[in-house]
Amino acid sequence: MNYLDRIVIDPRIRSGKPCIRGTRITVADIFEYLGSGMTPAEILADFPDLTNDDLQACFAFAAERDRRLNVLPHELAV
């Protein structure tokens, strides 16, 4: 799956935060719901416009963003 088909960054929507296409639901919103204990099934039940593929796109987006982070050498991070 190509997350770019489902995640959009538009400065006119939610101040340019990455959102699920066609919604105002941000990738961060999804992770906040998951972090608060909601299951993917509960999220999909609460937001019927979302699909499992939308949730998977959020994970793919976050994984790609994490891969691009600069990592400090251990000596500088301490």
Image (spheres, rainbow, N blue to C red):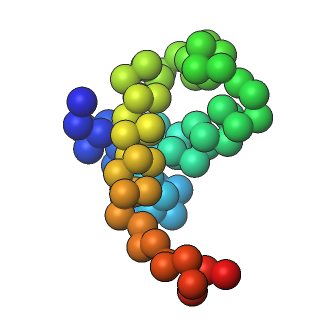
Count the numbered circles shown. Answer: 0
Give above or below for 29 relative to 56: below
**Residue 77 at x, y = what percent?**
61, 80
Give above or below for 72 relative to 10: below
| Residue at 60%, 40% in the rendered image | 31
| Residue at 37%, 40% in the rendered image | 60
Tell me: 50 left or right of 64: right
Q: Quadrant of the C terminus?
A: bottom right
Q: Is residue 14 visible?
A: yes
Give above or below for 8 relative to 1: below
- In the rendered image, the residue lying farthest to the right is 36
- In the rendered image, the residue lying farthest to the bottom is 76
Q: Residue 66 versus residue 36: which sits nearer the camera?
A: 66
Q: Is residue 21 visible?
A: no
Q: Residue 67 versus residue 8: which sits nearer the camera?
A: 67
| Residue at 51%, 45% in the rendered image | 27
Tell me: 62 left or right of 43: left
| Residue at 49%, 79% in the rendered image | 73
**Residue 74 at x, y = what percent?**
55, 77
**Residue 1 at x, y = what percent?**
24, 30
